[in-house]
Every structure is written in structure tokens, then in C-alpha cells.
Image (cartoon, rainbow, N blue to C red):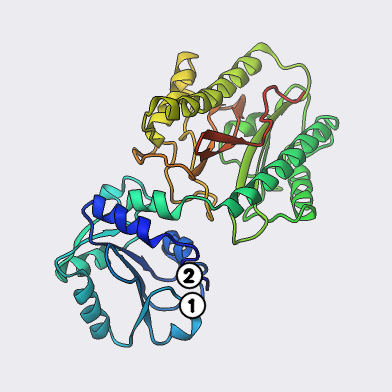
Amino acid sequence: MTTLQNFDFDALGRTLKQRGLDGWLVYDFHDSNPVAQRMLGDTGMLTRRLFLWLPAVGPAQLVVSTIDRPAVGDFPGEFVTYTTWQELHQHLASVVGGRRVAMETSPENAVPYLDKVPSGVVELLKRLGATVLPSAPLVTEFASRWSQAELQDHRRTAEAIAEIARGTLRLAIQHVGTATEVAVQRSVLEQLAGAGLETDDPPIVAFGPHAADPHYSPHESTNRTLAADEVVLLDLWARPSPKTVWADQTWMAFTGSPPGDVVTVWETVRNARDAVVDRLRKGPRSGEKLTGAMLDNVSREVINAAGYGHAFTHRTGHSIDLDLHGSGPHLDDFETHDVRELFEGVAFSVEPGIYLPGRFGVRSEINVVLGANGPEVTPAEPQTELIV
């Protein structure tokens, strides 16, 4: 278990003071809080409740059961161990009593990716004298931002899966009448493994009307054989190891010469995707503070203007970190109202889509990493035209 490697405690202390907080209390139990895993590394060996106390002033503390203490490695702070629940409560009272404490909570479950502390834990801390406040801005700034090593991993992975996607689609559309969704899916999995990459679930391969389901997953019972004059959607994601970040892309093809309605939908989706990137490029120059909700609306305006607003049925993008759907800001003012500010170092997908049930669906997905000079898009050459 690696703990708080290269963590900037001074910067966190300044941020806590600026926000009127006495500290950040990170809770975890059986890997229920991905923020704890991001801060501490793999906590899978721990079997009891864990609290990480990061104060505005003073040393960090890691509160663990005596049973779990041997499984914990080095820690740049103080260890506090407990055996009974009374000992745990007594120590927590000494830490949080009378203090303003940030935790992974989200009022009214507004952003479920942040709502990781059980209500019972919040009730306990309030009884012990704490004022519990959401840690959302701290998560963005200190838990979801990528390191330079993670950025390098992502760049390599992004180019690898882009090459796999392009090659797979070109080969598939040459085999109209014989290629199946399951066979293409298996081919992608083999290619990912051959490139030294892992994934947590098989890629989405959807032919024709199946592409109108945003989360369609092929099975033998639904396995479709590729036909002439239909769209092909391939959504694939991977990473080199569990200790680094993901890359996540969606590519589109068509078996034949695409008709006008397919071209129109494709161009609308692509333009909505690119409008988000353009807004991100303008943000640093204008000094504008951008949020995930604002960027969701940027892409949605393009699709609404084209008359397909009713068919864009999910958020524009999701945070990416050690989790494919990470804890940082999502591009979302549709499923949730995510008004977290986007900081340098955070990353996310941009993947608007239009889904016409019974006919076809189109999604185009790239990833964006925010740098000091604006957004970096991966892959370096995003899809601009349908593969035909």
C-alpha cells in the first residue's frame, strides 16, 4: 500500500484555510471510497474502517484498526490505531470536535460519484461535534488530477487504442455479411492484450439499430451480423496497469456510402464534440472559470440547434482517473448538475451522441487533459469523418 506519494501538504493546507476548513477527513470501508484509494493506493487489504485526517495545520493522521496496521506501509504522518468502537469514537471526537471538516458527501446526492460517506458516519461525526461539508473542490484539485507519469501512460494508451479502433473498423466493413458483433469484440480484446493493455469490461460493438442503445453490449443472444448500409459503433477503453489512468474512445464507421441523414447526424455529433474543445481553448485566454455543467450545455446547444436534442440522452462526458468514471468533474448538466470548476491537471471524456431507436446511433468520444496552456486532446488525430 503506497501512501500519499509526492503529495503537496503545503498546498492543501493553504486551500483548506482559504475555504475556511479545518481539515479533510477521508473515510473508507472495503474500498467504498475511490478518493481514499486515489490518495492511499490500493486499500484492498484493509478490512476495518479507515479515516485519513489531513488538517490545515499539523501532521496528517491515518486512523486504522490494529488488525489492519500490519497491512499498511509507510505513511508521511502519524498512525493512530484502535481496537474497539469506543476507542475509535474517542479519537474521532478529539480530531473533529468543533471543527469544519470536508468529506466525500454531495447534498441531495447531486453528484453520486462524490457521495461516498454513509449517512451513519456523517451522523456520528456531527454528534462528535463536527460540521461536515462537501469535499468536492478538494477532490478535484488533489485527488483527480493526473501526474506527469500518468499523462505519459495515457498518451501511449490513447494512440494504441486509436490504432486498434481504426484498423478494426476498416477490417470489419470489408466483411459485410460475415462479421459479427461478438467476433469483432473478441478481436478488440485480443488486440488490447497484445498491446499490453487491460480493460475492466469488453468494448461496445454495435451494428445498425443496436448503436441506438448508448450502452448496448453484444451477447450471443443478440449477436448481429454486419449488413450493408448500416453504422458501426466501437467504444473501447484500456490502461496499461491498475496503477495508472485510462484512455476511452468511441469511433464510427458505415458499410457503404452513408445517406444524408447519417452524415447529418455524424457531423452534428462531431461539431458538438469540437465545440467543447473550442470553448476549453478560449477559457484560459478569457480568464473564464469553466465547469462541467457549462461544457455539457455547449455540446447540447449544437445538437439542440440541429433538431436532435431529444435524442441526446446522456451527459457529454465523464471524469477519468484511476477509475474509468472518475471522481473529478463530469461534463454534465443533464443527469446531474455538476458545477465543479475544471482545474489544470484534470481529465475527462467528451462524447456527445445522437440515438434514434430502431434506426441507428452515433457517438464520437475523445479525451481531454487540461494543461497550463489549455486542453490537450487525445488521440492526437481524432476522428473527423466516418470510416467507410
Q: CA distance from mark 2 to mark 1?
A: 7 Å
Q: Residues within 10 Å of mark 1 (few under 14, many from 20)?
A: few
- SS at mark 1 in the image: loop
Q: Amino acid at mark 2?
A: Thr
User: Which of the two residues, 145 or 293, is positioned nearer the viewer here?
Assistant: 145
Query: Can you see residue 306?
Result: yes
* Residue carrying label 2: 3
Which comes sooner in the sequence, label 2 or label 1?
2
Above or below, 183 relative to 27: above
- SS at mark 2 in the image: loop
Above or below, 293 relative to 75: above
* Residue under the image location 34 percent in, 50 percent down: 136
Q: Is residue 122 left or right of residue 296?
A: left
User: Which of the two residues, 294 or 107, is positioned nearer the viewer here?
Assistant: 294
Q: Amino acid at mark 1?
A: Asp
Q: Are marks 2 and 1 in contact (CB under 8 Å)?
A: yes
The image shows residue 353 at horizontal and vertical percentages of: 54, 29
Query: Can you see residue 221?
Result: no
The image shows residue 146 at horizontal and vertical percentages of: 52, 51
The image shows residue 52 at horizontal and vertical percentages of: 36, 69
* Residue carrying label 1: 74
On residue 233, which mark appears? none
